[in-house]
Image: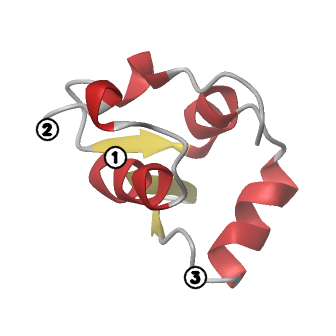
Amino acid sequence: MNQLIKTEKLKDRELIEIKDLIETLGVSQNTIYRMCERNELQKLKFRGKCWFRTENILTYLNSKGILNSNECIKI
């Protein structure tokens, strides 16, 4: 994940759909599912769609050093 992380879709939302997470992280759907299998991200299933808590995404990005403290978003 050396691309630019687009954090706009993480603002003012508690949950984000997988299609928005793909765009945010700039990775494929398969990569996101692998991240879930490795317990790096936790997905929620609701009405046949995968959702992710924005708080968990931000925590993951901070733990990997992808976002610095200046880029953190308050939820």
The picture places residue 16, in percent across and down from the top left corner, at: 42, 40
The picture places residue 44, in percent across and down from the top left corner, at: 44, 67
Which amino acid does the dot numbered 3 rest on? Answer: Asn
Helix, strand or loop for disc 3 = loop
Q: Residue furthest left?
A: 75
Image-based side of 32 in relation to 72, left or right: right
CB atoms of marks 2 and 1 within 8 Å: yes
Helix, strand or loop for disc 1 = helix
The picture places residue 41, in percent across and down from the top left corner, at: 53, 68
Q: Is residue 43 above or below residue 51?
A: below
Q: Residue at x 78, y 35 (%)?
A: 2
Residue 75 bears which disc, if any?
2
Count of number-bearing discs: 3
**Front in this rendered view, residue 35 or 60:** 60
Image-based side of 30 in relation to 53, left or right: right
Q: CA distance from mark 2 to mark 1?
A: 8 Å
Q: CA distance from mark 1 to mark 3?
A: 15 Å
**Front in this rendered view, residue 63 or 9:** 63
Residue named by callout 1:
54
Q: CA distance from mark 2 to mark 3?
A: 22 Å
Q: Residue furthest bottom?
A: 38
Q: Earlier in the sequence, mark 2 or mark 3?
A: 3
Residue 39 bears which disc, if any?
3
The answer to which quarter of the image holds residue 32 is bottom right
Helix, strand or loop for disc 2 = loop
Which amino acid does the dot numbered 2 rest on? Answer: Ile
Q: How many other residues sit within 10 Å of disc 1, few (<14), some (14-19) or many (≥20)?
A: many
Residue 70 bears which disc, if any?
none
